[in-house]
Each structure stands twice: as C-alpha cells, then as structure tokens.
Image (tube, rainbow, N blue to C red):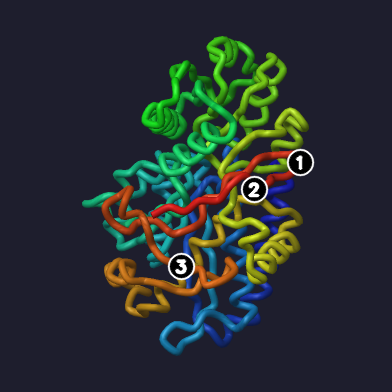
Amino acid sequence: MNRRTLLKSTALAAAASLVFFGAASAQNPVLKIGFVGVTSGPAAAWGISNQRSMETRAAWLNELGGVEIDGQKYDVQIVAFDDQKDPKRAIAGMEKMAQEGIHYVVGPNVDDGAAAVRPVAEQNGIMYFPYAFPKELYTAPASNAILGMVANYQSGPAIYKYLMENNGVKKVAFVAANESDPLSQRDGGVEAAKALGLEVVSDSVTYQVDTTDFTPVLLPVLQSQPDLLVLSGVSPANAPQLIRSARELGYTGLISTETAQDATVLQEGAGELANGFISVGGASTPELASDAMREFVDRYTKMFGEYNDESNTKVYALEYILETIKANPAAMNDVEEFKKTMDTFEAPNPFMVGDAKLTYVGTTSFGQKRQVSVPLVVNEFKDGAFQTLFVAQVD
C-alpha cells in the first residue's frame, strides 16, 4: 500500500468515526484505548493491521450501543499514534497517551519501541500490549506489558519440528536484517533449531533494511545448501524481495519466517515464486472462525477496502482489554486491579467456534501470565493467498 492510499483510507475512516461519534457520544461517555505502533515504512503492514482491527471492532461495538461496564454504556474511541518504527517516537506516543489519561495501549510492534516505552508505561499506570518478543518485557519485575501474539521462540520450534517430521528438513540457514528485532529473532531461532537437533549451516549473514539487491546477501547462505532458509524477523516489504532473489539464484528448498506477512504484498512482489513460503498467520482459520469472526472480516473489508490475515490475531487485544475491565470495573482507571484480574480471568471467545475462552497465558515462557491466548496458526502461501499448514497452542 502506498502512502497516498493509506492517507486516503485513514482519512475516510476518521471521517466515518467522527460522524458516528457525533451521533453516539450524546448518550454514552467515551472510553479511550490507545494504539502506538508503526503504520508507515517497510513494516507498516504490522501496525496498520493493529489500528484497523481496533477501529473496526470499536465501530462495531459502538453501533451495538457501546460496551457495558458496571451498568454504564461506553463508546470506545481509538487514539492512534504512528511511531514510524522509531523508539523515540514510540516514547512520544506513549507520553501522549499518558497526557490523555489513557491506561490501556496496544503496541508497539517492534522490540526497540516496546522496550523504550516501558518506563513511561510503568510511571503512568499504563498496561500495554506489544507485538514484540524480548522476554524481559514480560518477566518479573516487569508487569505492565502483555504479549499480544505468539512469540518467535514459541512458533519457531513448532515450525522447525513440523518441517523435520513432514518434510525431512535436516539443515537450516538463517538470514536477518541488521537491526535488533530480526537479530534477536535469529538468535532465538538458531537456539531452537540446535535444541531440536537441526544442523545450522549459516547464521551470521545480515543485510541493511534498505537493500534492493539481495543476490550478494543470499549467495553465501545458499552455498551452504540448507533444506530450510529462515528469514528471521523479516518485514512484509523485504520478504518478497528475499524470496524472489533466493528462487532466481536456483534455491529450491523451503523458506519460512516467524513473523506475520501480507498476502497481497507477497503476490505483488514475488508472485508464484512465493508459493510454499511459510509464515505465522492470523489466529484463525476457516475451521476455527465463528460467525463473529466472519462478520469482523466483512466489516473490516468494507471499512478499508481490503483485509490482512494478520488481523485475525490483531482483533484480540482490544477484546482482552474490554473484557478484563468488564470483569473488574475498578480496572478502568487502575491497572493494578487489571493485573489482579488476569490470573483468574476467563471469558467466552467470540471469534472462535465451540467453547473457546479468552484467557491469559505465558507462565511457561515468562513465569507469569503476560500473554493473550491465541491459536498459533502457521500458513503456507499459495497462488496469492495463505493456506493453513497447521495449528498449535501456547501455554
């Protein structure tokens, strides 16, 4: 998506929100929920999916009359801030949320930003839901961050084990952008691969995020003849370029990543060369999706003219925030009350079939419940769309 299209669609959504709130806010007070994340640049798809998911769900709930908390109906308003994948701007965004009296924020989307905002969040009584993987954000003494998705050190081993058992993978190579997020994910992937008994044949090759010619980057990696090439922490913009270069160099093995991707970007950037590419998907499949999830997808698509599979995961953060506050209304303005509720919290999961529940997990990885429970869905790209490869669960 280019900047002009993004600005246009965002402006239209904002206008629609203003019209709606003009009609609804006369009766209901407003509950503000923040978003601080990247919505511009190579990683924009991650944050755009967050913001649009929140805005779609908020508009839907408001249309139904608002969210009832302790007998009072509230209209949900999303206050968004583009941090441009810059930790300094992420801090400024979180400070803005504090100034507006917002106690619950979704984001940031990357490791640096999530770490940078921690002092502001803790000093101002803000719970935040990053899509970032450093364990120190979620382990004691840290307690204000809640991981909004499945981490690479949870999904990586599941992917590698599946490919070992079903595709005979024995040798794996890693390549990563020369930034803290991808490098951290690479190191976690290497550790997981070795623990599973895989032979790591390359793990030191990196590239700059503004690279346009990946041939010299990938050539030494592919010469090590891996069965699996892992694009650690790859951004949606770089993924098709790397895939195309690998295939044009004659690589016929498997390619995967532990980050979520955009099917449209893959199709436009790599076409059929991206067929077989494995990535972490949204937390839903056609078999898992409830009527509410299908309606969410329909509403999102009508609101923004397109849909991103990753929003199957990103829809959950706002739901967890609202349902936890509903379970303990004192948490609306006191995050310590929110934390007290998390250990025993349970609510129906509206987005999955059957008796699925919203609960907090993460005890195995972090020693405390600081992660939302969403299914680990692993996808395979084929002919312009994602197909489900397998589904797992995180404790």
Residue visible at 48% across and 17% down in the picture: 205
What label does residue 358 carry, if any? 3
Label 1 CA crowd tier, 10 Å (few <14, some 14–19, many 20+): some
**Front residue (pair 178, 25):** 178
Q: Is residue 113 left or right of residue 296?
A: left
| Residue farthest bottom in this picture | 71
Q: Position of residue 307 (x, y in %)?
A: 70, 54
If the image is split into quadrants, where does the C terminus sit? bottom left
Mark positioned earlier in the residue sequence (1 or 3): 3
Residue visible at 62% across and 58% down in the picture: 52
Mark positioned earlier in the residue sequence (2 or 3): 3
- Find the distance from the CA under tag 2 to the CA under tag 3: 22 Å
| Residue farthest left in this picture | 141
Q: Position of residue 72 (x, y in %)?
A: 46, 87
Indicate the amino acid at tag 2: Thr
Q: Which residue is mark 2?
A: 388
Q: Is residue 299 left or right of residue 227?
A: right
| Tally of numbered discs | 3
Residue 378, compared with residue 337, is above or below; it is above
The quarter of the picture where residue 312 lies is bottom right
Labelled pair 1, 2 in contact (Cβ < 8 Å): no
The answer to whether residue 218 is visible is yes
- Which type of secondary structure does the marked residue at label 2 adopt? strand
Which is more foreground, mark 2 or mark 3? 2
What label does residue 269 carry, if any? none
Indicate the amino acid at tag 1: Gly
Q: Which residue is mark 1?
A: 384
**Front residue (pair 134, 360):** 360
- Which type of secondary structure does the marked residue at label 3 adopt? strand
Residue visible at 62% across and 31% down in the picture: 239
Q: Is residue 378 left or right of residue 34?
A: right
Q: Position of residue 384 (x, y in %)?
A: 76, 41
